[in-house]
Amino acid sequence: MFGPRTDLALSRDPAGRTVPWIIAAMVFIGTLSLAAAFGLNEASAAWRHLVTGNLTVQVPDGPDADARADEAARVLAATPGVASARRLERAEVLRLLEPWLGRDAAATQLPLPRLVDVRLDPALAIDTRALALRLAESVPEARLDDHGPWLERLSRLTRGLQMIAAGGVGIVACATMLIVVFTIRAGLLVHREVISVLHLIGAQDAYIARQFQWHAVNMAFKGALPAFLLAALVAFALGLAADRLSAPLIPKVALGITGWLALPLVPLAAILLAAVTARFTVLLNLKRTL
Amino acid sequence: MVRFQNVGMRYGFGPEVLRDISFELEPGSFHFLTGPSGAGKSSLLRLLYLAHRPSRGIISMFGRDMAQAKRHELPEMRRRIGVVFQDFRLLAHLSALDNVALPLRIAGYPREKARAHVVELLNWVGLGDQLDALPATLSGGEQQRVAIARAVIARPRLLLADEPTGNVDDEMALRLMHLFIELNRLGTTVLIASHDQLLIRRLGKPVLRLVDGTILSGPPETA
Ligand SMILES: Nc1ncnc2c1ncn2[C@@H]1O[C@H](COP(=O)(O)OP(=O)(O)OP(=O)(O)O)[C@@H](O)[C@H]1O
Ligand SMILES: [Mg+2]
Protein backbone atom coordinates (compact mmCIF):
# COMPACT_ATOMS: atom_id res chain seq x y z
CA MET A 1 0.00 0.00 0.00
CA PHE A 2 2.81 2.41 0.84
CA GLY A 3 5.30 1.88 -1.86
CA PRO A 4 5.91 -1.00 -4.18
CA ARG A 5 6.63 -3.49 -1.41
CA THR A 6 4.42 -6.54 -1.15
CA ASP A 7 3.45 -8.46 1.98
CA LEU A 8 5.49 -11.47 0.97
CA ALA A 9 9.21 -11.01 0.41
CA LEU A 10 9.12 -13.34 -2.57
CA SER A 11 11.78 -11.67 -4.66
CA ARG A 12 14.43 -12.63 -2.09
CA ASP A 13 13.74 -16.34 -2.29
CA PRO A 14 16.83 -18.20 -3.45
CA ALA A 15 14.60 -20.72 -5.26
CA GLY A 16 13.36 -17.93 -7.51
CA ARG A 17 16.80 -16.94 -8.72
CA THR A 18 17.27 -19.87 -11.09
CA VAL A 19 13.83 -19.59 -12.64
CA PRO A 20 14.60 -16.68 -15.00
CA TRP A 21 17.53 -18.64 -16.43
CA ILE A 22 15.40 -21.70 -17.07
CA ILE A 23 12.62 -19.63 -18.59
CA ALA A 24 15.24 -17.87 -20.72
CA ALA A 25 16.41 -21.21 -22.09
CA MET A 26 12.80 -22.24 -22.76
CA VAL A 27 11.93 -19.02 -24.55
CA PHE A 28 15.10 -19.19 -26.62
CA ILE A 29 14.31 -22.72 -27.79
CA GLY A 30 10.63 -21.92 -28.27
CA THR A 31 11.31 -18.80 -30.32
CA LEU A 32 13.79 -20.54 -32.59
CA SER A 33 11.43 -23.50 -33.05
CA LEU A 34 8.64 -21.19 -34.10
CA ALA A 35 11.02 -19.28 -36.38
CA ALA A 36 12.02 -22.59 -37.96
CA ALA A 37 8.39 -23.55 -38.49
CA PHE A 38 7.65 -20.25 -40.22
CA GLY A 39 10.87 -20.40 -42.23
CA LEU A 40 9.94 -23.85 -43.49
CA ASN A 41 6.52 -22.64 -44.44
CA GLU A 42 7.95 -19.79 -46.49
CA ALA A 43 10.61 -22.00 -48.04
CA SER A 44 8.16 -24.67 -49.10
CA ALA A 45 5.82 -22.02 -50.52
CA ALA A 46 8.76 -20.61 -52.46
CA TRP A 47 9.70 -24.02 -53.82
CA ARG A 48 6.12 -24.69 -54.74
CA HIS A 49 5.89 -21.37 -56.56
CA LEU A 50 9.13 -22.13 -58.36
CA VAL A 51 7.87 -25.41 -59.82
CA THR A 52 4.16 -24.84 -60.33
CA GLY A 53 4.77 -22.24 -63.02
CA ASN A 54 6.07 -24.87 -65.41
CA LEU A 55 5.80 -28.45 -66.53
CA THR A 56 8.22 -30.75 -68.26
CA VAL A 57 7.36 -33.21 -71.00
CA GLN A 58 9.73 -36.07 -71.72
CA VAL A 59 9.86 -37.84 -75.04
CA PRO A 60 12.00 -41.00 -75.02
CA ASP A 61 14.95 -41.27 -77.34
CA GLY A 62 14.08 -42.74 -80.71
CA PRO A 63 14.58 -42.37 -84.47
CA ASP A 64 12.39 -39.31 -84.88
CA ALA A 65 12.38 -38.20 -81.26
CA ASP A 66 13.13 -34.57 -82.15
CA ALA A 67 10.11 -34.39 -84.46
CA ARG A 68 7.87 -36.07 -81.91
CA ALA A 69 9.01 -33.61 -79.28
CA ASP A 70 8.36 -30.68 -81.60
CA GLU A 71 4.89 -32.09 -82.27
CA ALA A 72 4.25 -32.32 -78.51
CA ALA A 73 5.42 -28.72 -78.07
CA ARG A 74 3.07 -27.60 -80.86
CA VAL A 75 0.07 -29.35 -79.32
CA LEU A 76 0.82 -27.98 -75.89
CA ALA A 77 1.40 -24.43 -77.09
CA ALA A 78 -2.04 -24.47 -78.73
CA THR A 79 -3.70 -25.39 -75.44
CA PRO A 80 -5.34 -22.52 -73.50
CA GLY A 81 -3.50 -21.81 -70.24
CA VAL A 82 -0.10 -22.65 -71.70
CA ALA A 83 2.06 -19.57 -72.21
CA SER A 84 4.79 -21.29 -74.19
CA ALA A 85 6.20 -24.73 -74.96
CA ARG A 86 9.65 -25.26 -76.40
CA ARG A 87 11.84 -28.24 -77.02
CA LEU A 88 15.21 -27.98 -75.29
CA GLU A 89 18.25 -28.41 -77.55
CA ARG A 90 20.59 -31.30 -76.80
CA ALA A 91 23.18 -28.88 -75.47
CA GLU A 92 20.70 -27.49 -72.98
CA VAL A 93 19.73 -30.95 -71.78
CA LEU A 94 23.38 -31.84 -71.36
CA ARG A 95 23.95 -28.69 -69.32
CA LEU A 96 21.08 -29.70 -67.02
CA LEU A 97 22.68 -33.09 -66.56
CA GLU A 98 26.15 -31.72 -66.01
CA PRO A 99 25.99 -31.92 -62.20
CA TRP A 100 25.34 -35.65 -62.49
CA LEU A 101 27.23 -36.71 -65.56
CA GLY A 102 30.09 -34.25 -65.68
CA ARG A 103 31.34 -32.03 -68.48
CA ASP A 104 32.41 -34.93 -70.68
CA ALA A 105 28.86 -36.16 -71.08
CA ALA A 106 28.56 -34.11 -74.27
CA ALA A 107 31.12 -36.35 -75.94
CA THR A 108 29.27 -39.54 -75.11
CA GLN A 109 26.46 -40.89 -77.22
CA LEU A 110 24.02 -41.30 -74.36
CA PRO A 111 20.41 -41.94 -75.41
CA LEU A 112 19.00 -38.75 -73.95
CA PRO A 113 15.27 -38.14 -73.82
CA ARG A 114 13.98 -34.94 -75.41
CA LEU A 115 12.61 -32.39 -72.98
CA VAL A 116 9.88 -29.87 -73.66
CA ASP A 117 9.82 -26.98 -71.27
CA VAL A 118 6.23 -25.80 -70.76
CA ARG A 119 5.53 -22.41 -69.21
CA LEU A 120 2.05 -21.97 -67.80
CA ASP A 121 0.02 -18.81 -67.85
CA PRO A 122 -0.27 -17.88 -64.14
CA ALA A 123 -3.57 -16.08 -64.82
CA LEU A 124 -5.29 -19.27 -66.03
CA ALA A 125 -5.73 -22.38 -63.94
CA ILE A 126 -4.89 -25.45 -65.95
CA ASP A 127 -6.07 -29.03 -65.60
CA THR A 128 -2.90 -31.07 -65.97
CA ARG A 129 -4.90 -34.29 -66.31
CA ALA A 130 -6.77 -32.97 -69.39
CA LEU A 131 -3.48 -31.68 -70.71
CA ALA A 132 -1.93 -35.14 -70.35
CA LEU A 133 -4.86 -36.77 -72.22
CA ARG A 134 -4.62 -34.31 -75.04
CA LEU A 135 -0.91 -34.92 -75.30
CA ALA A 136 -1.46 -38.71 -75.33
CA GLU A 137 -3.72 -38.42 -78.37
CA SER A 138 -0.99 -37.01 -80.58
CA VAL A 139 2.26 -38.14 -78.91
CA PRO A 140 1.36 -41.23 -76.86
CA GLU A 141 4.94 -41.98 -75.77
CA ALA A 142 5.40 -38.51 -74.18
CA ARG A 143 5.37 -38.30 -70.43
CA LEU A 144 4.07 -35.27 -68.61
CA ASP A 145 5.86 -34.41 -65.36
CA ASP A 146 3.97 -31.92 -63.20
CA HIS A 147 6.29 -32.40 -60.20
CA GLY A 148 3.34 -33.86 -58.26
CA PRO A 149 5.17 -36.63 -56.34
CA TRP A 150 8.04 -34.29 -55.57
CA LEU A 151 5.67 -31.66 -54.21
CA GLU A 152 3.88 -34.32 -52.21
CA ARG A 153 7.16 -35.39 -50.60
CA LEU A 154 8.10 -31.77 -50.00
CA SER A 155 4.90 -31.04 -48.12
CA ARG A 156 5.20 -34.22 -46.10
CA LEU A 157 8.71 -33.25 -45.07
CA THR A 158 7.62 -29.72 -44.24
CA ARG A 159 4.70 -30.94 -42.17
CA GLY A 160 6.92 -33.41 -40.33
CA LEU A 161 9.48 -30.76 -39.46
CA GLN A 162 6.74 -28.39 -38.38
CA MET A 163 5.30 -31.04 -36.11
CA ILE A 164 8.71 -31.51 -34.52
CA ALA A 165 8.91 -27.75 -33.99
CA ALA A 166 5.41 -27.70 -32.48
CA GLY A 167 6.37 -30.61 -30.22
CA GLY A 168 9.42 -28.64 -29.12
CA VAL A 169 7.25 -25.66 -28.24
CA GLY A 170 4.90 -27.97 -26.32
CA ILE A 171 7.74 -29.50 -24.31
CA VAL A 172 9.04 -26.02 -23.57
CA ALA A 173 5.60 -24.99 -22.30
CA CYS A 174 5.33 -28.07 -20.06
CA ALA A 175 8.81 -27.54 -18.64
CA THR A 176 7.99 -23.89 -17.92
CA MET A 177 4.84 -24.91 -16.08
CA LEU A 178 6.67 -27.54 -14.04
CA ILE A 179 9.44 -25.22 -12.94
CA VAL A 180 6.88 -22.58 -11.95
CA VAL A 181 4.82 -25.10 -9.99
CA PHE A 182 7.87 -26.32 -8.05
CA THR A 183 9.10 -22.82 -7.31
CA ILE A 184 5.71 -21.59 -6.16
CA ARG A 185 5.22 -24.60 -3.92
CA ALA A 186 8.61 -24.01 -2.37
CA GLY A 187 7.58 -20.38 -1.86
CA LEU A 188 4.32 -21.39 -0.18
CA LEU A 189 6.29 -23.55 2.22
CA VAL A 190 8.92 -20.92 3.00
CA HIS A 191 6.31 -18.23 3.58
CA ARG A 192 3.64 -20.30 5.30
CA GLU A 193 3.90 -18.26 8.51
CA VAL A 194 3.27 -14.97 6.74
CA ILE A 195 0.54 -16.54 4.61
CA SER A 196 -1.14 -17.80 7.76
CA VAL A 197 -1.05 -14.29 9.28
CA LEU A 198 -2.48 -12.81 6.08
CA HIS A 199 -5.28 -15.35 6.18
CA LEU A 200 -6.05 -14.59 9.81
CA ILE A 201 -6.17 -10.88 9.08
CA GLY A 202 -8.81 -11.61 6.47
CA ALA A 203 -6.92 -11.99 3.21
CA GLN A 204 -8.65 -14.03 0.53
CA ASP A 205 -6.73 -16.73 -1.30
CA ALA A 206 -6.85 -14.56 -4.41
CA TYR A 207 -5.05 -11.77 -2.55
CA ILE A 208 -2.18 -14.11 -1.74
CA ALA A 209 -2.29 -15.73 -5.18
CA ARG A 210 -1.94 -12.30 -6.79
CA GLN A 211 1.38 -11.70 -5.06
CA PHE A 212 2.76 -15.02 -6.25
CA GLN A 213 1.37 -14.35 -9.70
CA TRP A 214 3.22 -11.04 -10.02
CA HIS A 215 6.33 -12.67 -8.66
CA ALA A 216 6.05 -15.26 -11.43
CA VAL A 217 5.50 -12.54 -14.03
CA ASN A 218 8.63 -10.75 -12.84
CA MET A 219 10.73 -13.90 -12.91
CA ALA A 220 9.42 -14.92 -16.34
CA PHE A 221 9.91 -11.43 -17.77
CA LYS A 222 13.49 -11.27 -16.57
CA GLY A 223 14.26 -14.48 -18.45
CA ALA A 224 11.95 -14.15 -21.44
CA LEU A 225 12.91 -10.69 -22.71
CA PRO A 226 16.68 -11.15 -23.19
CA ALA A 227 16.17 -14.71 -24.43
CA PHE A 228 13.67 -13.55 -27.02
CA LEU A 229 15.91 -10.74 -28.26
CA LEU A 230 18.80 -13.15 -28.58
CA ALA A 231 16.70 -15.76 -30.40
CA ALA A 232 15.28 -13.15 -32.78
CA LEU A 233 18.82 -12.00 -33.53
CA VAL A 234 19.92 -15.57 -34.22
CA ALA A 235 16.91 -16.17 -36.48
CA PHE A 236 17.67 -12.96 -38.38
CA ALA A 237 21.34 -13.89 -38.75
CA LEU A 238 20.45 -17.36 -40.02
CA GLY A 239 18.10 -15.79 -42.55
CA LEU A 240 20.88 -13.51 -43.80
CA ALA A 241 23.30 -16.42 -43.99
CA ALA A 242 20.82 -18.44 -46.07
CA ASP A 243 20.42 -15.48 -48.41
CA ARG A 244 24.18 -15.28 -48.88
CA LEU A 245 24.29 -18.91 -49.96
CA SER A 246 21.90 -18.15 -52.82
CA ALA A 247 22.27 -21.70 -54.08
CA PRO A 248 19.82 -22.36 -56.92
CA LEU A 249 17.80 -24.93 -54.97
CA ILE A 250 17.65 -23.00 -51.69
CA PRO A 251 15.06 -20.29 -52.05
CA LYS A 252 15.19 -17.11 -50.00
CA VAL A 253 14.48 -18.11 -46.44
CA ALA A 254 12.39 -15.47 -44.76
CA LEU A 255 9.96 -15.56 -41.88
CA GLY A 256 7.52 -13.28 -43.59
CA ILE A 257 5.64 -10.56 -41.81
CA THR A 258 3.35 -13.06 -40.01
CA GLY A 259 6.39 -14.90 -38.74
CA TRP A 260 7.97 -11.80 -37.28
CA LEU A 261 4.64 -10.81 -35.75
CA ALA A 262 4.16 -14.28 -34.30
CA LEU A 263 7.59 -14.64 -32.70
CA PRO A 264 6.96 -12.21 -29.79
CA LEU A 265 4.02 -14.42 -28.86
CA VAL A 266 6.51 -16.95 -27.49
CA PRO A 267 7.86 -14.78 -24.62
CA LEU A 268 4.39 -13.33 -24.04
CA ALA A 269 2.93 -16.81 -23.82
CA ALA A 270 5.72 -17.88 -21.45
CA ILE A 271 4.99 -14.96 -19.13
CA LEU A 272 1.26 -15.55 -19.28
CA LEU A 273 1.74 -19.26 -18.68
CA ALA A 274 3.96 -18.57 -15.67
CA ALA A 275 1.38 -16.19 -14.21
CA VAL A 276 -1.57 -18.50 -14.69
CA THR A 277 0.35 -21.53 -13.42
CA ALA A 278 1.47 -19.62 -10.32
CA ARG A 279 -2.05 -18.46 -9.62
CA PHE A 280 -3.60 -21.89 -9.84
CA THR A 281 -0.78 -23.53 -7.90
CA VAL A 282 -1.40 -21.12 -5.02
CA LEU A 283 -5.19 -21.41 -5.13
CA LEU A 284 -5.11 -25.21 -5.23
CA ASN A 285 -2.60 -25.45 -2.39
CA LEU A 286 -4.32 -22.92 -0.14
CA LYS A 287 -7.61 -24.78 -0.49
CA ARG A 288 -6.14 -27.42 1.78
CA THR A 289 -5.56 -24.93 4.60
CA LEU A 290 -8.25 -23.60 6.92
CA MET B 1 -21.67 -12.22 19.53
CA VAL B 2 -19.89 -15.44 20.52
CA ARG B 3 -21.38 -18.60 21.96
CA PHE B 4 -19.60 -21.88 22.81
CA GLN B 5 -21.59 -25.00 23.67
CA ASN B 6 -19.69 -28.04 24.97
CA VAL B 7 -16.75 -27.26 22.76
CA GLY B 8 -13.71 -29.53 22.73
CA MET B 9 -10.47 -29.07 20.85
CA ARG B 10 -7.39 -31.10 20.13
CA TYR B 11 -4.23 -30.66 18.08
CA GLY B 12 -4.02 -33.33 15.44
CA PHE B 13 -4.56 -36.70 17.09
CA GLY B 14 -3.32 -35.48 20.49
CA PRO B 15 -5.36 -35.30 23.69
CA GLU B 16 -8.11 -32.74 24.11
CA VAL B 17 -6.54 -29.51 25.34
CA LEU B 18 -9.97 -27.95 25.73
CA ARG B 19 -13.11 -29.80 26.82
CA ASP B 20 -16.71 -28.96 27.63
CA ILE B 21 -16.22 -25.26 27.11
CA SER B 22 -19.50 -23.34 27.32
CA PHE B 23 -19.79 -19.58 27.59
CA GLU B 24 -21.23 -16.59 25.86
CA LEU B 25 -19.86 -13.15 25.06
CA GLU B 26 -22.59 -10.52 24.73
CA PRO B 27 -22.10 -7.89 22.04
CA GLY B 28 -20.19 -4.95 23.50
CA SER B 29 -18.91 -6.90 26.50
CA PHE B 30 -15.38 -6.84 27.92
CA HIS B 31 -13.87 -10.00 29.42
CA PHE B 32 -10.55 -11.17 30.70
CA LEU B 33 -9.43 -14.75 30.21
CA THR B 34 -7.06 -16.08 32.86
CA GLY B 35 -5.65 -19.38 33.95
CA PRO B 36 -2.31 -21.02 34.55
CA SER B 37 0.21 -21.44 31.83
CA GLY B 38 -0.74 -24.31 29.56
CA ALA B 39 -4.39 -24.19 30.59
CA GLY B 40 -5.43 -23.54 27.00
CA LYS B 41 -5.97 -19.78 26.76
CA SER B 42 -4.17 -19.42 23.47
CA SER B 43 -5.94 -22.50 22.14
CA LEU B 44 -9.33 -21.03 23.02
CA LEU B 45 -8.44 -17.80 21.24
CA ARG B 46 -7.28 -19.82 18.25
CA LEU B 47 -10.80 -21.20 17.94
CA LEU B 48 -12.16 -17.68 18.19
CA TYR B 49 -9.99 -16.21 15.47
CA LEU B 50 -10.85 -19.11 13.19
CA ALA B 51 -7.38 -20.60 12.99
CA HIS B 52 -8.60 -23.97 14.23
CA ARG B 53 -11.76 -26.03 14.12
CA PRO B 54 -13.23 -27.55 17.29
CA SER B 55 -13.21 -31.33 17.58
CA ARG B 56 -16.72 -31.23 19.00
CA GLY B 57 -19.38 -28.84 20.25
CA ILE B 58 -20.99 -25.84 18.64
CA ILE B 59 -19.38 -22.45 18.13
CA SER B 60 -21.50 -19.64 16.85
CA MET B 61 -20.10 -16.23 16.00
CA PHE B 62 -21.85 -13.16 14.67
CA GLY B 63 -25.03 -15.18 14.94
CA ARG B 64 -23.71 -17.88 12.61
CA ASP B 65 -22.98 -21.54 13.33
CA MET B 66 -19.33 -21.85 12.38
CA ALA B 67 -19.67 -25.51 11.41
CA GLN B 68 -21.86 -24.31 8.54
CA ALA B 69 -19.52 -21.56 7.40
CA LYS B 70 -17.89 -22.21 4.05
CA ARG B 71 -14.20 -21.65 3.57
CA HIS B 72 -14.72 -18.70 1.26
CA GLU B 73 -16.85 -16.96 3.90
CA LEU B 74 -14.08 -16.96 6.48
CA PRO B 75 -12.05 -13.95 5.23
CA GLU B 76 -15.10 -11.71 5.57
CA MET B 77 -15.63 -12.89 9.15
CA ARG B 78 -11.95 -12.61 10.03
CA ARG B 79 -11.95 -8.98 8.97
CA ARG B 80 -14.40 -8.32 11.76
CA ILE B 81 -12.00 -9.85 14.27
CA GLY B 82 -8.86 -8.10 15.49
CA VAL B 83 -6.15 -10.31 16.97
CA VAL B 84 -3.08 -9.57 19.07
CA PHE B 85 -1.04 -12.78 18.89
CA GLN B 86 0.99 -13.86 21.89
CA ASP B 87 4.07 -13.93 19.65
CA PHE B 88 3.00 -10.78 17.70
CA ARG B 89 3.44 -12.32 14.26
CA LEU B 90 4.55 -9.10 12.62
CA LEU B 91 5.76 -9.37 9.03
CA ALA B 92 9.52 -9.08 9.34
CA HIS B 93 10.21 -7.23 6.10
CA LEU B 94 7.46 -4.63 6.52
CA SER B 95 7.90 -1.40 8.48
CA ALA B 96 5.79 -0.67 11.55
CA LEU B 97 3.63 1.53 9.36
CA ASP B 98 3.08 -1.16 6.72
CA ASN B 99 2.41 -3.82 9.34
CA VAL B 100 -0.29 -1.72 10.93
CA ALA B 101 -1.74 -0.78 7.54
CA LEU B 102 -1.99 -4.43 6.49
CA PRO B 103 -5.61 -5.08 7.56
CA LEU B 104 -6.77 -1.92 5.78
CA ARG B 105 -4.82 -2.83 2.69
CA ILE B 106 -6.29 -6.32 2.64
CA ALA B 107 -9.76 -4.84 3.02
CA GLY B 108 -9.03 -2.57 0.06
CA TYR B 109 -8.98 0.85 1.76
CA PRO B 110 -7.82 3.86 -0.26
CA ARG B 111 -4.14 4.41 0.41
CA GLU B 112 -3.96 8.00 1.58
CA LYS B 113 -6.96 7.76 3.88
CA ALA B 114 -5.44 4.69 5.48
CA ARG B 115 -2.04 6.27 5.97
CA ALA B 116 -3.28 9.21 8.03
CA HIS B 117 -5.24 6.78 10.16
CA VAL B 118 -2.24 4.51 10.73
CA VAL B 119 0.10 7.36 11.60
CA GLU B 120 -2.38 8.71 14.14
CA LEU B 121 -2.71 5.35 15.86
CA LEU B 122 1.05 4.72 15.94
CA ASN B 123 1.48 8.15 17.53
CA TRP B 124 -1.08 7.20 20.11
CA VAL B 125 0.80 4.05 21.14
CA GLY B 126 4.02 6.08 21.33
CA LEU B 127 5.66 4.90 18.13
CA GLY B 128 5.26 8.09 16.11
CA ASP B 129 8.99 8.32 15.51
CA GLN B 130 9.41 4.64 14.54
CA LEU B 131 7.05 4.55 11.59
CA ASP B 132 9.62 3.14 9.19
CA ALA B 133 11.36 0.82 11.63
CA LEU B 134 11.42 -2.89 10.83
CA PRO B 135 10.16 -5.21 13.59
CA ALA B 136 13.64 -6.65 14.17
CA THR B 137 14.91 -3.21 15.21
CA LEU B 138 12.10 -2.65 17.71
CA SER B 139 12.13 -3.74 21.36
CA GLY B 140 9.73 -6.44 22.55
CA GLY B 141 7.37 -3.88 24.02
CA GLU B 142 7.46 -1.79 20.87
CA GLN B 143 6.69 -4.81 18.70
CA GLN B 144 3.80 -5.60 20.98
CA ARG B 145 2.41 -2.12 20.49
CA VAL B 146 2.69 -2.46 16.72
CA ALA B 147 0.80 -5.76 17.02
CA ILE B 148 -1.90 -4.08 19.08
CA ALA B 149 -2.18 -1.20 16.62
CA ARG B 150 -2.55 -3.71 13.76
CA ALA B 151 -5.32 -5.52 15.67
CA VAL B 152 -7.39 -2.40 16.29
CA ILE B 153 -6.73 -0.34 13.13
CA ALA B 154 -9.75 -1.64 11.23
CA ARG B 155 -12.13 -1.15 14.19
CA PRO B 156 -13.02 -4.85 14.54
CA ARG B 157 -16.33 -5.96 16.04
CA LEU B 158 -14.49 -8.53 18.13
CA LEU B 159 -11.03 -7.96 19.60
CA LEU B 160 -8.96 -10.87 20.87
CA ALA B 161 -5.66 -10.22 22.63
CA ASP B 162 -3.27 -12.86 23.92
CA GLU B 163 -1.11 -11.42 26.72
CA PRO B 164 -1.08 -8.00 25.08
CA THR B 165 0.74 -6.31 27.92
CA GLY B 166 3.30 -8.96 28.78
CA ASN B 167 6.26 -6.96 27.56
CA VAL B 168 5.53 -3.41 28.63
CA ASP B 169 5.81 -1.51 31.92
CA ASP B 170 2.76 -0.93 34.10
CA GLU B 171 2.16 2.56 32.86
CA MET B 172 2.17 1.54 29.19
CA ALA B 173 0.07 -1.52 30.08
CA LEU B 174 -2.60 0.71 31.53
CA ARG B 175 -2.42 3.02 28.54
CA LEU B 176 -2.89 0.10 26.15
CA MET B 177 -5.77 -1.22 28.25
CA HIS B 178 -7.42 2.13 27.85
CA LEU B 179 -7.10 1.74 24.12
CA PHE B 180 -9.08 -1.50 24.39
CA ILE B 181 -11.60 0.12 26.73
CA GLU B 182 -12.02 2.99 24.29
CA LEU B 183 -12.59 0.53 21.46
CA ASN B 184 -15.05 -1.35 23.67
CA ARG B 185 -16.90 1.90 24.37
CA LEU B 186 -17.35 2.28 20.62
CA GLY B 187 -19.04 -1.12 20.51
CA THR B 188 -16.29 -3.70 20.03
CA THR B 189 -16.56 -6.91 22.05
CA VAL B 190 -13.25 -7.53 23.81
CA LEU B 191 -11.62 -10.66 25.19
CA ILE B 192 -8.14 -10.40 26.68
CA ALA B 193 -6.05 -13.33 27.86
CA SER B 194 -3.82 -12.17 30.68
CA HIS B 195 -1.81 -13.34 33.65
CA ASP B 196 -1.65 -9.92 35.19
CA GLN B 197 -4.03 -10.27 38.17
CA LEU B 198 -3.20 -6.79 39.39
CA LEU B 199 -4.23 -5.23 36.13
CA ILE B 200 -7.37 -7.38 35.90
CA ARG B 201 -8.43 -6.38 39.37
CA ARG B 202 -7.69 -2.73 38.67
CA LEU B 203 -10.03 -2.66 35.66
CA GLY B 204 -12.81 -4.61 37.40
CA LYS B 205 -14.03 -6.41 34.29
CA PRO B 206 -15.60 -9.91 34.27
CA VAL B 207 -13.21 -12.84 34.13
CA LEU B 208 -13.36 -16.23 32.45
CA ARG B 209 -11.07 -18.60 34.33
CA LEU B 210 -9.63 -21.49 32.37
CA VAL B 211 -8.13 -24.33 34.38
CA ASP B 212 -6.93 -27.59 32.91
CA GLY B 213 -8.77 -27.16 29.64
CA THR B 214 -12.15 -26.10 30.92
CA ILE B 215 -13.91 -22.94 32.13
CA LEU B 216 -14.26 -22.78 35.91
CA SER B 217 -16.23 -19.63 36.54
CA GLY B 218 -18.18 -17.30 34.32
CA PRO B 219 -19.50 -14.68 36.73
CA PRO B 220 -17.78 -11.33 37.20
CA GLU B 221 -14.96 -11.28 39.67
CA THR B 222 -13.95 -8.07 41.32
CA ALA B 223 -12.17 -9.10 44.50
N1 LIG C 1 0.45 -26.40 18.13
C1 LIG C 1 0.25 -27.24 19.15
N2 LIG C 1 0.33 -28.57 18.94
C2 LIG C 1 0.14 -29.43 19.95
N3 LIG C 1 -0.15 -29.07 21.20
C3 LIG C 1 -0.25 -27.76 21.49
C4 LIG C 1 -0.05 -26.78 20.48
N4 LIG C 1 -0.21 -25.56 21.02
C5 LIG C 1 -0.48 -25.76 22.32
N5 LIG C 1 -0.51 -27.07 22.61
C6 LIG C 1 -0.81 -27.68 23.92
O1 LIG C 1 -2.09 -27.22 24.32
C7 LIG C 1 -2.11 -26.94 25.70
C8 LIG C 1 -2.62 -25.53 25.91
O2 LIG C 1 -1.71 -24.63 25.33
P1 LIG C 1 -2.02 -23.09 25.23
O3 LIG C 1 -0.94 -22.46 24.43
O4 LIG C 1 -3.40 -22.91 24.75
O5 LIG C 1 -1.92 -22.63 26.75
P2 LIG C 1 -1.96 -21.16 27.36
O6 LIG C 1 -3.01 -21.16 28.38
O7 LIG C 1 -2.06 -20.15 26.30
O8 LIG C 1 -0.54 -21.04 28.04
P3 LIG C 1 0.36 -19.72 28.28
O9 LIG C 1 -0.27 -18.97 29.40
O10 LIG C 1 1.71 -20.27 28.65
O11 LIG C 1 0.38 -18.97 27.01
C9 LIG C 1 -0.69 -27.13 26.21
O12 LIG C 1 -0.65 -28.36 26.91
C10 LIG C 1 0.16 -27.20 24.96
O13 LIG C 1 1.20 -28.13 25.15
MG1 LIG D 1 -0.86 -18.71 25.51
Image (cartoon, helix red, strand yellow):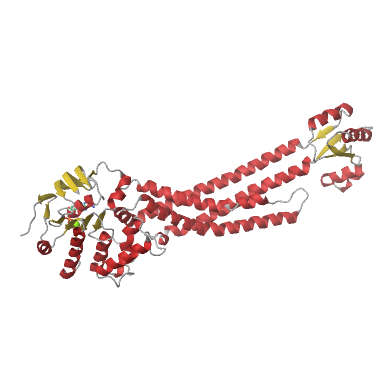
Q: Residue at (7%, 59%) from the top-left corner?
A: B222
Q: Residue furthest left?
A: B223
Percent from the top left, x then y, of residue A215?
44, 57
Q: Residue at (69%, 51%) from the top-left corner?
A: A254
Q: Residue furthest bottom?
A: B129
Considering depth in this image, is A264 or B132 the residue closer to the camera? B132
Give residue A76's quadrant in the image: top right
Q: Residue at (61%, 42%) from the top-left corner?
A: A163
Percent from the top left, x then y, of residue B197?
10, 62
Q: Residue at (39%, 48%) from the top-left corner?
A: A283
| Residue A202 visible from this viewpoint | yes
> Is B3 placed left or right of A82 in the picture?
left
Considering depth in this image, is A160 or A208 the residue closer to the camera? A208
Considering depth in this image, is B129 or A69 the residue closer to the camera? B129
Q: Quadrant of the C terminus of chain B?
A: bottom left
> Is A243 placed left or right of A187 in the picture?
right
Considering depth in this image, is B37 or B117 the residue closer to the camera? B117
> Is A110 placed left or right of B31 in the picture?
right
Q: Residue furthest front?
A: B186
Q: Is residue B108 above or below residue A60?
A: below
Percent from the top left, x then y, of residue B87?
24, 60
* Image quarter for ligand 1: bottom left
| Residue A60 visible from this viewpoint | no
